[in-house]
Image (cartoon, rainbow, N blue to C red):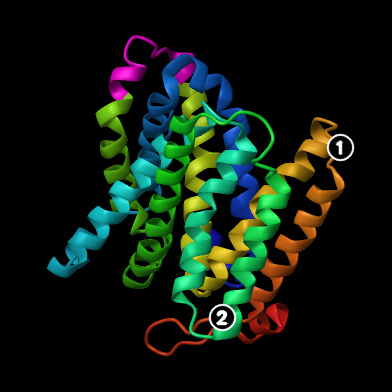
Amino acid sequence: MPLLNSASRVPPWSLAVTSMLSVQLGAALSVQLISTTGPAGTAWLRLTMAALIFLALARPPLREVRRNDVPTLVGLGVATGVVSVAFLAAIDRIPLGTAVAVEFLGPLTVAAVRTHRPRALAWPGLALVGVVLLTQPWHGQVDPVGLAFAALAALCWATYIVLTQRVGDRFTGISGLSLTVPLGAVTAAVVGVPQAAGHLTVGILAAAAGLAVLLPVLPFALEMLALRQMTPAAFGTLMALEPAFGLLLGLVVLHQTPSPSQLAGILLVVLAGAAAQREGRRVPPGGRTAPHSELDVIG
């Protein structure tokens, strides 16, 4: 695919950043759909539409699947379904900023656990401080059930990052997603179908299809491509930039002025993300190195 070939020639951090922007926009536009079909119903509809899109773009590599691939594929599929349901359930009960802050504990934990350089542990810690300053979870009342959903999303997202890299290394292009996203849709269907039943119209299905492109089709594809070229530690810390994008979009679109502590949080997560991705290049399995121009861009 020409698009995927072009994506493989750009810096991996830019793929991750584009993914974050798509996630933010997709989450914002999903609010109205959640009010109609519920968080689980919305997650199921988006994943189902995404599964159809991936199946149309890439043929499932069933003949390439080995027995030892099955646990990874099933694990990623289940994690995909659960994280989608859990995060939408969280933002249905608690502020988006708080939910995002808690969910990012997953990638940050991956970054801390998977790093092999003692000094690299400082970057997830710095990013965590920035996320706390950015989202200010101490303001307002927090629903404990919403927090529990966000914590579940954090656990599943950490699992998603690790397993996505494994699937991306095993299968070419985005073909692995044509296996895992349908599994995610089936997982979400367990609680999503009962919520969405009775609310399905042509307009709802069309809206779900459009949202599926923003989240999860584009982010999942870009994240898989990025994780082929970045370590989980770098990727996990870089993803902490997403709350900063949310705050900046709030300033531009909603005219929400950030406080001094929130601005300090933005600076901290940007610094941590930039430092982590600079040290986070990886050589894909087989010893292949990234194109020379890509390494130049990263530094």
For residue 13, the mark is none
* Chain part drawn in magenta: 193-204
At label 1, counting other C-alpha atoms closer than 10 Å, the crowd grade (few under 14, some 14-19, many 20 or more) is few
Vertical comparison of 15 with 208: above or below: below
SS of the residue at dot 1? loop
- Which residue is painted at 38% across and 51% down in the image? 156
Q: Residue 119: within the magenta?
A: no
Check disc 2 and give the amino acid type: Arg
Picture quadrant where residue 295 is located:
bottom right
Vertical comparison of 93 with 298: above or below: above
Front in this rendered view, residue 265 or 55: 265
- Which residue is painted at 57% across and 20% down in the image? 32
At label 2, counting other C-alpha atoms closer than 10 Å, the crowd grade (few under 14, some 14-19, many 20 or more) is many
Check disc 1 and give the amino acid type: Thr
Picture quadrant where residue 296 is located:
bottom right
- Which residue is painted at 63% across and 87% down in the image? 292
Marks 2 and 1 sit apart, C-alpha to C-alpha, by 35 Å
x and y percent of residue 205 in the render?
A: 44, 21
Tag 1 residue: 257
For residue 281, the mark is 2
